[in-house]
């Protein structure tokens, strides 16, 4: 009895006969609809529907346009004058705001809003470049090759805030860094020194907040709070070394404590990085901290005169983490080797990093030019060269200088001391003035050390690049041209409407009449419209049509 077709059994009952017959009829209809004659009938039906729409739409358009022309015929010249004046005023305000926004921020406000907000709404893909100077230890060489040259990078030779930038502020009373520069550094610190697992450790949670603080005193206070919670918090020592230490010696002491704590944490992360994605992210963060600390220790050694020790530390760091070449540690190495006058080693480093597939920098281009100039600059004379011509070595040196100046035309004025130097920023714009300041601040002494190098640079630059264009040159955005043209056109229409009101009203009505044939197919529609627009002159216009 249990198997007798009760609906409560576990097995499925037989299908309903009515449902089966309906399914068979649906299959027969579907097969018939797939035949050629059925498709032809569907096409004919669709064509008839389209024809009805084509014949019906002009009738509705005709009624709508007739109503619109009746409305326009009642408008006075004062309305057109007020309309053109209002349009000119609004477009002028937009033009002034666009111009102010471009002069202050270097971008078009309308374009920025459309790209940031409107494009995602309409489903457009935004291929924005990566955040400036936010490099991770897990990225490889391919990502470096795909990065654009003209972008904001972290200055590889940036100074120490407490030991160097603050001394300038104490003496002059002026801020050495802009808010924009410090904001980029705060973003870098949060990218380098934080991860998702920081919430599991109280000291790292405190440091997460510390990197977001705008006040240096608040950041230093937070770093000490993190050390009270955990005496081995490497990032806390990093912050104290950068901002509280008032001398390079004090900064080096803090960085050595950070190195000891960072190596211990790095070893722990290596042992458990494969357990989960969170542990892998923590390993990347600990790697970033370790690389940053070792690099800054090498820079401390360089500033304290222990140059060979600094060179060894940089070479070891580049060998231990070869995928971090995007951090431009080789530029620190180039400057230290130039200080040692180890020009053969400099050439070896250039041979590795002066590659066409890698992003260039002023340090690479101008160091290559310096080495070429060193071979000929001591005996170079413009008068002698003009008489006998340039030798092969001199041609190579001149071409190297050409290449460097083409990459960044701002550098020669700083090297030739035609512009005064200031403290280099923490971030630079490739091929921009900030990169020129950063390069000349550290490398001017190396050019002065080679006799005749600056003379060769001056002759080559003055003879070829005297009227060099500023790069990157900011072109006016499209919307500035558009709003300026719209404002001028509207103002011209307002002036003409004020001076010749009747003529301008007639011109507007004539433009409307000329647009009607493009919208309507029937010839009979134009005559009543013309009679509405021009009751007096309609017979003559109709006769001409």
Image: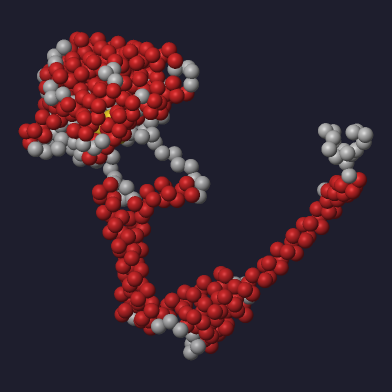
Q: Give coordinates of residue 231: x percent, y percent.
A: 27, 18
Instruction: Say which quadrant the C terminus sits in.
Output: bottom right
Nearest the viewer among 277 and 342 is: 277
Nearest the viewer among 499 and 153 is: 153
Identified at 47% across, 46% down, the residue is 120
Q: Answer with the quarter of the image where residue 383 lies.
A: top left
Horizontal placement of 543 versus 219: left or right? Answer: right
- Does residue 5 sit above or below 369 in this rendering? below
- Does residue 8 sit above or below 162 in this rendering? below
Visible residue check, residue 117: yes
Identified at 88% across, 39% down, the residue is 6
Q: Give coordinates of residue 142: x percent, y percent.
A: 43, 24
Nearest the viewer among 25 and 500 is: 25
Horizontal placement of 318 versus 376: left or right? Answer: right
Identified at 32% across, 79% down, the residue is 498
Nearest the viewer among 173 and 475 is: 173
Q: Give coordinates of residue 284: x percent, y percent.
A: 39, 21
Visible residue check, residue 403: no
- Residue placed furthest toward the left: 171
């Amino acid at each position: 009895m249990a198997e007798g077709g009760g609906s409560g059994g576990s097995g499925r009952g037989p299908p309903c006969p009515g449902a089966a017959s309906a399914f068979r009829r649906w299959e027969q209809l579907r097969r018939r609809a797939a035949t050629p004659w059925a498709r032809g009938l569907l096409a004919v039906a669709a064509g008839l529907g389209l024809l009805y729409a084509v014949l019906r739409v002009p009738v509705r358009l005709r009624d709508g346009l007739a109503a619109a022309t009746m409305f326009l015929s009642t408008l006075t010249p004062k309305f057109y004058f007020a309309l053109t004046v209002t349009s000119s005023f609004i477009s002028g305000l937009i033009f002034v705001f666009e111009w102010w926004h471009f002069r202050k921020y270097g971008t078009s406000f309308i374009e920025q809003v459309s790209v940031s907000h409107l494009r995602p709404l309409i489903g457009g893909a935004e291929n924005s470049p990566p955040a400036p100077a936010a490099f991770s230890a897990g990225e490889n060489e391919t990502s470096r090759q795909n990065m654009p040259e003209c972008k904001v990078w972290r200055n590889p030779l940036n100074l120490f805030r407490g030991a160097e930038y603050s001394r300038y502020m104490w003496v002059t009373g002026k801020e050495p860094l802009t808010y924009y520069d410090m904001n980029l550094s705060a973003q870098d610190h949060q990218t380098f020194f934080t991860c998702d697992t920081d919430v599991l450790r109280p000291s790292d949670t405190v440091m997460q907040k510390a990197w977001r603080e705008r006040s240096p005193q608040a950041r230093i206070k937070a770093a000490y709070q993190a050390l009270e919670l955990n005496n081995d918090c490497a990032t806390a020592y990093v912050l104290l070394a950068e901002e509280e230490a008032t001398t390079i010696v004090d900064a080096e002491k803090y960085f050595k404590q950070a190195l000891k704590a960072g190596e211990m944490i790095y070893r722990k992360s290596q042992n458990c990085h494969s357990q989960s994605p969170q542990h892998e992210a923590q390993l990347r963060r600990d790697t970033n901290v370790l690389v940053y600390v070792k690099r800054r220790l090498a820079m401390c050694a360089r500033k304290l005169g222990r140059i060979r020790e600094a060179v060894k530390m940089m070479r070891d760091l580049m060998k231990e983490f070869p995928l971090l070449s995007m951090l431009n540690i080789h530029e620190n190495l180039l400057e230290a080797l130039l200080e040692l006058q180890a020009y053969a080693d400099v050439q070896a480093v250039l041979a590795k990093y002066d590659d066409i597939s890698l992003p260039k920098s002023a340090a690479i281009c101008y160091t290559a030019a310096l080495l070429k100039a060193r071979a000929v600059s001591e005996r170079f004379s413009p008068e002698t060269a003009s008489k006998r011509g340039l030798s092969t070595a001199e041609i190579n040196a001149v071409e190297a200088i050409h290449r460097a100046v083409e990459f960044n035309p701002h550098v020669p004025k700083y090297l030739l001391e035609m512009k005064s130097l200031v403290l280099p920023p923490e971030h630079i714009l490739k091929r921009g003035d900030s990169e020129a300041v950063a390069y000349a601040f550290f490398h001017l002494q190396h050019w002065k050390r080679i006799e005749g190098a600056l003379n060769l640079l001056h002759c080559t630059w003055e003879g070829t690049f005297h009227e060099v264009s500023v790069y990157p040159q900011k072109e006016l955005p499209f919307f500035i041209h558009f709003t300026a043209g719209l404002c001028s056109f509207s103002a011209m229409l307002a002036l003409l409407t004020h001076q010749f009101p009747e003529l301008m009203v007639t011109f507007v009505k004539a433009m409307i009449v000329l647009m009607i044939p493009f919208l309507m197919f029937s010839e009979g529609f134009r005559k009543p419209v013309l009679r509405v627009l021009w009751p007096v002159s309609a017979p003559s216009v109709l006769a001409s049509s």
